[in-house]
Amino acid sequence: MRFMVIIKADKKSEAGILPTQETKKTFAAMGKFNEQLAKAGVMLAGEGLQPSSKGKRVRFSGQQRTVIDGPFSEAKEVVGGFAILEFKSKEEAIEGALQFMELHRKFWPGWEGETEVRQVLGPEAFAPEA
């Protein structure tokens, strides 16, 4: 089963604050963790995102199409990064997300954050029933 782990942005990432020596240790540990997941065939994709100030939202409502410039108001509702992971169960996916977040806590004292774990709907979910 494929899962998307959505990493929520925080005030620092939304402000575009570049990594300090402290966060470089976090990123190095995350890189090693991600490499292990990739070698095990678990990590299919994963990236961080630029701050929402560099993004756009496209909205359709009836016949109207609107393009909205970032930044977006609630940083806690903005995606800061993502990973597509292959696990046997939702419980394994949650455990993977917990390990990822624990790396942040270990190398970045005082860090608080949130991720969202959601199963990916593949094409099989939309196939007509036989």
Image: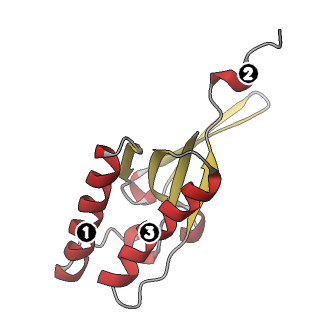
Q: Earlier in the sequence, mark 2 or mark 1?
A: 1
Residue 30 in the figure: left or right of residue 13 = left
Viewer-nearest residue: 53 or 36: 36
- SS at mark 3? helix
Q: How crowded is mark 1: few (under 14 residues within 10 Å), some or many (20 or more)?
A: some
Of badges 3 and 2, the one in the foreground is 3
Q: Which residue is drawn at 53% across and 56% down?
A: 6
Q: Where is residue 7 in the image (x, y as percent from the top left)?
A: 49, 61
Q: Where is residue 4 in the image (x, y as percent from the top left)?
A: 54, 48
The residue where tag 2 is placed is 126
Q: Distance between the residues labelled 3 and 2?
A: 32 Å
Image mark count: 3
- SS at mark 2? helix
Q: In which quarter of the image is residue 81?
A: bottom left
Q: How crowded is mark 2: few (under 14 residues within 10 Å), some or many (20 or more)?
A: few
In the rendered image, which quarter contains the C terminus? top right
The outermost residue toward the left is 21
Q: Quadrant of residue 110?
A: bottom left
Q: Distance between the residues labelled 2 and 1?
A: 38 Å
* Relative vertical location of residue 18 with respect to residue 117 in this rendering, above or below: below
The residue where tag 3 is placed is 99
Q: Earlier in the sequence, mark 3 or mark 1?
A: 1
Q: Residues within 10 Å of mark 3 (few under 14, many from 20)?
A: some
- The three-letter code of the residue at mark 2 reads Phe
